[in-house]
């Protein structure tokens, strides 16, 4: 009776602590002022803002839920051994981890996730934070510490969840010892909800990996006791259980059930070596998406798929909003922007240094009014960030395809090309069309093979758009004629 009473007390205390610590997901908004702009007045910037994204930070599993999970893991181990006493001995050897997620086939964006929270190395709770790199990219609460790594869908987490953008895969070979599915996957608060979808895998050395918050019914057909290989599909990212945004919580424990931080670093006191085959840097500064829009708004209520307001076709009198979605932007980071007209001339450029604190997840926008002096045709907006150039295109006074596509990958080579441009497709398509950057149609031909040679010898030197049409959907890529 005393044990039951103590469990109830712990459970009630944990719920109270969780509710007390709950804070709504929020954005911190800053006006961008420190930008050096060059170009004529018709391309001037009207307004610009930076938004740092912050996510609610409370525990994924309460103490009672962890106790229950450990019991389930041990019970399932015994059931597996009863059927096959050598099950775990026959496992493939534990390998260094690969990333426990990947983009779905056909994803062709710059990025789809950010890493927001690491394992808390400082076991003293209540805002005593320390990650493996001696930073504070982690969190704790009044009576506990974050014990895993959180990979968040970004941008448009709910839209990308619906589109199955993030696939969860096994980081190393093992046997499924827990499988949970069928629970609500569009939760918006960390409220101690114990009903999460996910997988627990045991490796050959007795260590385990917990994969949490899967999308409902988006999980492997394999069952408890089945073996999985490294890189094998486990499920889809969702927001089940105690979660307020679609993400993967990845948690590792050794054979004695001690927390392991798979990332090696000066302040990792849990294990001395990295568990990753290729451990990525602590900071991975990049632009996940650059795009043009009809609005600066980003306020769709959770958990509805985001209204992106994306737009690529503009006319005189329209407002154009350039947005970039960032990962790991640090104080002092420089981003260099340039706008090229249909003749490939730079008509506007500006530099921006971020003066604000580090944000793992952020976005920013710049607005411009399209005037009658803008030339008709296709424009290219680019951003240079840490020596990588990110581009997006939009049309003024003409039309570009706006249809989203499920078409598989398109490969063109060489690019730039002189006489022959090679086109390689994963799936059949009906035709290709070549457009000049001012929107003029140059050539159009049927496609009869997955590999096609396009003769561009007669084209003038410059930049062109190659549009591939398949089943009513058009995909566009840019190439350069030398």
Image: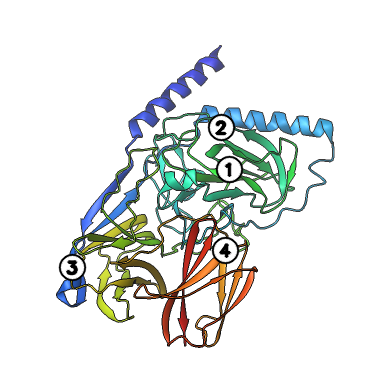
Left-right relation of 253 to 475: right
Left-right relation of 253 to 304: right
Q: Are there few (<14), some (14-19), or many (20+) residues within 10 Å of tag 1?
A: many
Residue of label 1: 211
Of the image marks 4 and 2, the number of the one nearer the N terminus: 2
Q: Which label is found at residue 371? A: 3
Where residue 449 appears, as percent x and y from the top left, is 65, 69
- Residue 352's place in the image compared with 7, above or below, is below
Q: Which label is found at residue 66? A: 2
Q: Nearer the viewer, residue 468 or 331?
A: 468
- Foreground mark, 1 or 2, reads 1
Of the image marks 3 and 2, the number of the one nearer the N terminus: 2
How far, Cα to Cα, is label 4 from label 2? 54 Å
- Foreground mark, 3 or 2, reads 3
Of the image marks 1 and 2, the number of the one nearer the N terminus: 2
Q: How many marks?
A: 4
Q: Are there few (<14), some (14-19), or many (20+) residues within 10 Å of tag 4?
A: some
From this viewpoint, is residue 288 visible?
yes
Residue drawn at (55%, 74%) of the image: 412
Where residue 478 appears, as percent x and y from the top left, is 45, 73
């Amino acid at each position: 009776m005393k044990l039951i009473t103590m469990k109830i007390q712990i459970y009630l205390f944990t719920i109270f602590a969780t509710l007390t610590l709950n804070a709504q997901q929020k954005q911190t908004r800053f006006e961008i002022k420190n930008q050096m702009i060059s170009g004529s007045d018709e391309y001037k910037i009207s307004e610009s803002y930076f938004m740092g994204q912050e996510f609610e930070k409370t525990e994924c599993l309460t103490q009672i839920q962890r106790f229950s999970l450990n019991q389930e893991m041990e019970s399932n181990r015994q059931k597996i051994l009863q059927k096959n006493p050598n099950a775990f001995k026959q496992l493939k050897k534990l390998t260094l981890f690969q990333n426990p997620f990947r983009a779905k086939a056909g994803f062709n964006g710059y990025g789809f996730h950010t890493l927001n929270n690491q394992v808390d190395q400082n076991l003293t709770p209540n805002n005593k934070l320390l990650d493996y790199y001696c930073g504070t990219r982690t969190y704790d609460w009044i009576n506990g510490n974050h014990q895993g790594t959180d990979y968040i869908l970004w941008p448009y987490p709910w839209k990308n969840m619906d589109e199955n953008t993030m696939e969860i895969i096994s980081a190393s070979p093992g046997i499924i010892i827990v499988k949970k599915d069928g629970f609500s996957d569009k939760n918006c608060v960390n409220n101690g909800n114990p009903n999460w979808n996910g997988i627990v895998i045991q490796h050959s050395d007795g260590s385990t990996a917990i994969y949490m918050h899967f999308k409902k019914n988006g999980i492997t057909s394999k069952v408890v006791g089945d073996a999985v290989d490294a890189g094998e599909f486990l499920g889809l990212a969702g927001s089940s259980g105690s979660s307020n945004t679609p993400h993967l919580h990845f948690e590792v424990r050794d054979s004695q059930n001690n927390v392991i931080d798979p990332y090696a670093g000066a302040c990792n006191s849990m294990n001395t070596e990295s568990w990753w085959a290729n451990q990525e840097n602590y900071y991975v500064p990049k632009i996940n998406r650059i795009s043009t829009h009809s609005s600066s708004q980003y306020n769709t209520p959770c958990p509805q798929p985001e209204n992106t307001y994306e737009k690529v076709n503009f006319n005189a009198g329209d407002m154009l909003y350039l947005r970039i979605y960032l990962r790991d932007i640090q104080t002092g980071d420089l981003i260099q922007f340039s706008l090229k007209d249909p003749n490939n001339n730079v008509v506007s450029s500006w530099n921006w240094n971020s003066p604000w604190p580090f944000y793992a997840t952020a976005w920013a926008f710049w607005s411009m009014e399209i005037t009658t002096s803008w030339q008709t045709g296709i424009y290219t907006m680019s951003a240079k960030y840490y020596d990588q150039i990110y581009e997006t295109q939009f049309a003024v006074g003409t039309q570009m395809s706006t249809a989203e596509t499920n078409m598989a990958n398109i490969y063109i080579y060489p690019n730039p090309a002189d006489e022959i441009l090679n086109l390689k497709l994963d799936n059949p398509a009906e035709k290709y069309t070549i457009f000049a950057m001012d929107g003029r149609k140059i050539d159009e031909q049927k496609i009869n093979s997955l590999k096609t040679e396009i003769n561009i010898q007669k084209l003038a030197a410059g930049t062109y758009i190659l549009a591939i049409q398949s089943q009513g959907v058009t995909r566009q890529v840019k190439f350069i004629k030398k």
